[in-house]
Amino acid sequence: MTTINAYGPPGRLTDLDDIGKKAWHVFISDSVDQAITGPDPAEVLHDSPRPQFYNLTKTDTAADAVQAAVTWTAFPNRLKAAISDRQRWQRADASRDVQDEYCEWSVTRVGGGKITRVTFTCEGPEYWDVLAQTNPDKALDIYRAHIGPAVRRSDLFGPNGRYIRRNKWNDSTTQGAMHLIQQSNTLGAEIELAAAATIRRVIGGRELTGAQELIACAKYGVPDRNSDPHIGEVVNSIARQKADIALSDPVGIYFDDLATDGWSTPDGSAPKSFWTVERGDTGFPVRAVYEVPAGRGFAVGDITIGGRPIEFGAQIADFVTVKLTATACRLGTSTARPQTACVELAAGDDVTPGAFAPGAFSAHGYLGTHPDQASRSTRLVA
Amino acid sequence: MSLWDRTPERRRATAWPAAATAAVAAADEDGGLRPGTLYRGVSGVDRGPVPMPVGQFAGLRDPMAMVFFRQGRWPMTLEEVLDGLTGAGELPAQSVYLISEAGQIPPDEAPGLRRDFRFAISRAAPGRDPDLLVSSDPGSVFLQVAAWDPVSRVFNYYMRISPAWVWTGDSWSSMAPESRGKGCFDSHVNGSVVMKELKQPWSNWQSMSATVQLAPDDPLRDNPLYRQVIGAERLELTVKGLVSRWTTARLSAVVDDGMVAHPDHLLRQLFTSTTVNLASTSTQSATVMSGDRDLSQPLGFWLNADALLNDLGLPVGMETVPTAPASLYADSLAAFGFRLEEQVSDFSQPGDTFFAFVVPEPAYEDNDVVRQSVEKSLMPARFAACALMVDFTNPVFSPVRAHLMRYVPTAPVPASTWCDDIASAVVAAARILPADSPEAEFARNWAVPEADWPGVFAQRVDVYLEKVTARIRTASGFDDCVRLAESRRRTFKDMRLNEFALTLPATDIPADAPRLRMNEDGTVGVVTTGGSP
């Protein structure tokens, strides 16, 4: 039986100073607590509390604890309604706003043509808020190291000194990608989703088990993403085993793998050898680059996937998986009762994405966050 | 009946006729296999398992042969295979996948239904594509291996028949007339590994789209391999890569001294459906309610989009797949009496499969032969496009396209002109045939100038998709679409690839209902000639 002293930085990154580490812990711990409490029952029905979700710093993790990884594909599922691969790749490469699977990327080309480098990130924006506020020099250094030496302090911070998430070096698919900016891609959303999914739902005498029926009932995310329904389904399946569940420390989204099946390089070298993790501890990668080192005589655009040259970063995203990890313990012992109704607003309106203000759910407020940048539940995004 | 069919050590095929199932029970007549022996038993070639000749044995270079058989090691269980590879330091990267056609039926709602869980396991060298795939079940009742031989550049197929192992053929055996479609090649139809639910949502597989449901006390929970199961989205990539590996090896071997050997073997994968993929919507059927969001049918139901749009690059203007009101789908379930049935377990449940609207669509392995043939300049893109645009609204089981196989020679042909020669033969025949003949349709396609065919064909596709999009938004149009889907499912059910009764739904549509086809104006009509190729 054990608790941890504090939530650590995502990826076990070492950028934060002591103040930053404390701020980060406070953010995660508060977010977890708020997610356990759930929304105000006076405003939202059948969605609180979440007694099977727990805070690793306050509640013991029992000896029977097991880790459960939840993985999904980085390419945005919502773009798969395109009529051809080329259409969906073009759309995914066109804007970070459609890269909504907790993974975003930026593409570097030679003279606007052949791809030489694709940068992938799954770093949550909240971490960068904390880092930039508590150690702005470090934030600038990291930008310069990973994006380019041309990055200036004024590019990252507004006149009031506040960090700009969508700054000129982190708001496109061509100028670089330092951390997640798509509005659904927040760690706050991940925490809220995981907590909400711990509620078992028995509707009409039948317990819901499917990913889509669960998310339709509990309304904890966007149904047509790869990530949200899957996270909810796996977490709920653990909850149905009457376990207590937490997001494992360090809380974050991580790269799971890059598959290279069917890839071919001009010189026969292993295509996976060009995938380099740039940030994050072993087992917790949060930033990776796909790039062929200079001197090899070819570039990323010369590598083929299923016979086709890589013309889009999205082609690689088809092969990237990302993950989160949950901790489950006290299996078979939870006495939490299932909800017997689906989530709805107390006013009687149906809960639909984008239909109400963020304040109705977990606020996720934390040190120094600008209101416009407060992390939001994915359920609020159309 | 072949060895493959007689052995009890194979999957329980609930969709196969009772006669075949009964034969399994009395299948031990070939008993007496000696332990520590590798047999060969190619269905259609060998009358029974015979010890593999020394010369052939020495030629096997795949991991199964190198790690086990040539070392005098004979693993009898799935775990022994995996542990043996690990112990030898071979192919350490392991990925475990899980499939069950009953996997989305809540165990407490059907306690008598057998789950038939199976594992698919890949093993690879670090950073490389897998070289070995194992198919087995948690109790190792059956144990089958596909292993890549890097020297012969084929997959070797093995199955354990206790207390021995049997080599059941290699990729080329799938092409040989005497063994084609027999034994393991009833599913490994063209010699490569197979995953027939190859696209999202990977029906029946555990994946990021659906988790296989287990009873709280299911012993599978304690199986170490179960705890390693990852999503089938990863297996899709693996299978596609391995199919392409075999296609590459095969194409490099079929052209010799400027001549294409067995041109019919290649072009049957252009003109016919040698096998199919099973596609579906990504929507859980039970969540589709009247008034809910539109339902997107699989694009492969409407046309061979993978080949025409992705591989050949027709520049279509349409930007989204056709969708139908969910209410029409929901209504159709009752109107046509959709249900899941497995007679072996006396199981029946109203409704569609877990993911709505499962239909056969063109197989990746057929399209890959075309794609690579074009890529290697073995087949002009124009020829492939002209062929695929014949009856393109029926992407699978088209007797119209299959009809054109009669113009494909079986003897070796010059690689530089073979497609032009076939086209010329078809065009010549069209001159004296009706305008609605397959030959005439091909001839019209072939008459489109080289520079224009992508745009012309794309426009036809756009017009067609606009029409079907309009049609399926009407009640009668959608009902036609349901009947057409059921017609294609029934053709699939006649194939040996259809192993499990729960793979597809049953309906009240009469068993003797005529097979249907899609017309280019978006209407559905009756197939008047031919049938499944």
Image: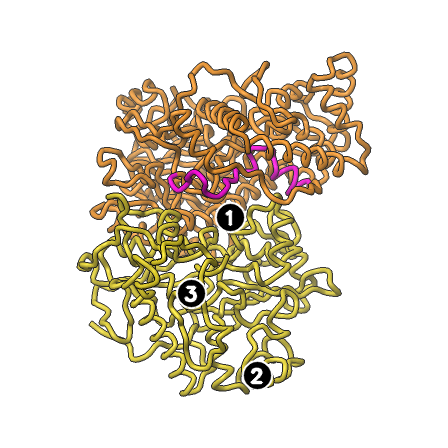
Chain colours: A yellow, B orange
Please tell me the numbered disc located at residue B237: 1
Q: Secondary structure at mark 1?
A: helix
Residue with the mark numbered 2: A141
Contact flag, marks 1 and 3 (Cβ < 8 Å): no
Q: Vertical placement of B236 versus B274: above or below?
A: below
Circle 3/circle 2 CB separation < 8 Å? no
Indicate the position of residue A143 as horizontal and vertical percent values.
Answer: 58, 78
Residue at image location 69% in from the left, 41% down from the top: B316
Quadrant in which the N terminus of chain B is drawn: top left
Residue A362: image quadrant is bottom left
- Residue denoted by label 3: A189
Q: Residue at x 61, y 59 (%)?
A: A313
- Magenta-tinted stretch: B286-312
Q: Taking B483 as reference, is B17 left or right?
A: left
Mark 1, other Cα within 10 Å: few <14 / some 14–19 / many ≥20:
many
Distance in Å between CA atoms under marks 2 and 1:
38 Å
For residue B440, what is the image quadrant? Answer: top right
Kindly identify which chain the residue marked by label 2 belongs to: A
